[in-house]
Amino acid sequence: MINSKNILLYPLSLIYGWITATRNFMYNTGILKSVEFRIPVICIGNITVGGTGKTPHTEYIAELLKQYFKVAVLSRGYKRESKGFRIASPTSHITEIGDEPMQIFRKYPDLMVTVDRNRVNGVKRILEADPETEVILLDDAYQHRSLTPGLSILLSDFARPFVRDQMMPYGNLRESADNMRRADIILITKSPENLSPIQRRLIVKEFNKSPYQNLYFTSLKYDSPIPLYNSTAKMEPHFKISRNPDCGIVLITGIANPRPFKEYLQKYYNEVTHLSFPDHYKFKDKDIQCITSAFNELKSAEKYLITTEKDAVRLQEFINFAEPIRSLSYFIPVKIHFLNNDKEEFDNTIVEYVRKNKRNNRISEI
């Protein structure tokens, strides 16, 4: 939808669109070279600015594949302070690898989680570090044309479909919607659970996918809250979603699109104070003071601080939260749910791609 307030940005979006179109043309025609590796490489990305759920979907695929194959994850490590190739380890700091890779590594410490802005170099370094790696997941690399993945998965937010968007800075597109043709799979993320068959058909028609492309709908499932500062602590028996609407919540978010998470909490709690920060925000001491004030100002007798899993990685750097806030702080992980019973088909597509494209060309035994 065109925003008249930003109409002066439209000429800039035309220039940006021409630049990205020229770049893609040069890759498509072979003027600029792209490297393709023999090892299975799966790209999970988008063509829009803002959160479409890349990290939860990367985690979903990692959890699926690690049952059968040796998996490595390669991310850019957005807003990290280090440079070059890095492998996550128990001693890694968020400033070294970034918040999203840190989140993945903490959840799956048995995986090789790496960061490198240069994806080609990153893949080479992964294979040097562990030649037994069987599949590499590229988190947020759809625009990195210097590397040709074997399988591309493109995400689009249900509420902000890229087929209705405009080029940056007038809109949110990093490249034109026509570049969806490079994807093998399109995922419509954050879809409502009650999506009707008619709505589904209308959306599929609007995207006008090619015959070789599969399109699926996914939604976010919010899991049980986890203590922010004591991972071994058990959830308080009385703190159950939908059980006690009279308690107060301070919601802390530093993600691109916090609206679904906020709406989720507002379904269950009467008092929700939302403190919203920019995506990948680096919290400061003054923010802790602001959070503390918001918590103390809640009118409810029973109250909690709730944040996202990605924000938890950054907030855990602050150990100076005073009691009782420290003991009443939780984060809520999210999981991916496929609508329309498409999970089995999607899972089989991913697993079979890796099986058929392993370097030794042998069928894996499950």
Image: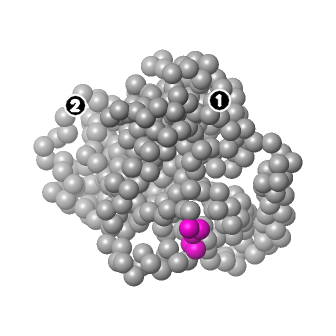
Within 10 Å of the Cα at label 1, are there few (<14), some (14-19), or many (20+) other Cα atoms?
many
Q: Of all residues shown, which one is farthest toward the left?
A: 237
Quadrant for residue 4, please give it: bottom right
Question: Where are the magenta residues, as a range?
Answer: 207-211
Residue that carries the numbered disc 1 in the rendered image? 122
| Cα–Cα gap, marks 2 and 1 | 37 Å
- Where residue 72 appears, x then y in whole percent? 51, 30
Q: Looking at the image, which residue is at 38% across and 41% down?
A: 64
Quadrant for residue 247, please give it: bottom left
Is residue 117 something one can see in this rendering?
no
Inspect the image, locate mark 1, and give the three-letter code of the amino acid beneath it.
Gly
Q: How is the image coloured?
A: one colour
Within 10 Å of the Cα at label 2, are there few (<14), some (14-19), or many (20+) other Cα atoms?
few
Q: Looking at the image, which residue is at 61% across and 74% down?
A: 164
Residue 209 part of the magenta-drawn span: yes
Q: Which tag, 2 or 1, sits closer to the chain's start?
A: 1
Q: Secondary structure at mark 2?
A: loop
Inspect the image, locate mark 2, and give the three-letter code of the amino acid beneath it.
Ala
- Where residue 185 appears, x then y in whole percent? 52, 57
SS assignment for the magenta stretch, majority: loop
Mark 2 vs mark 1: in front = 1
- Where residue 213 appears, x then y in whole percent? 54, 62
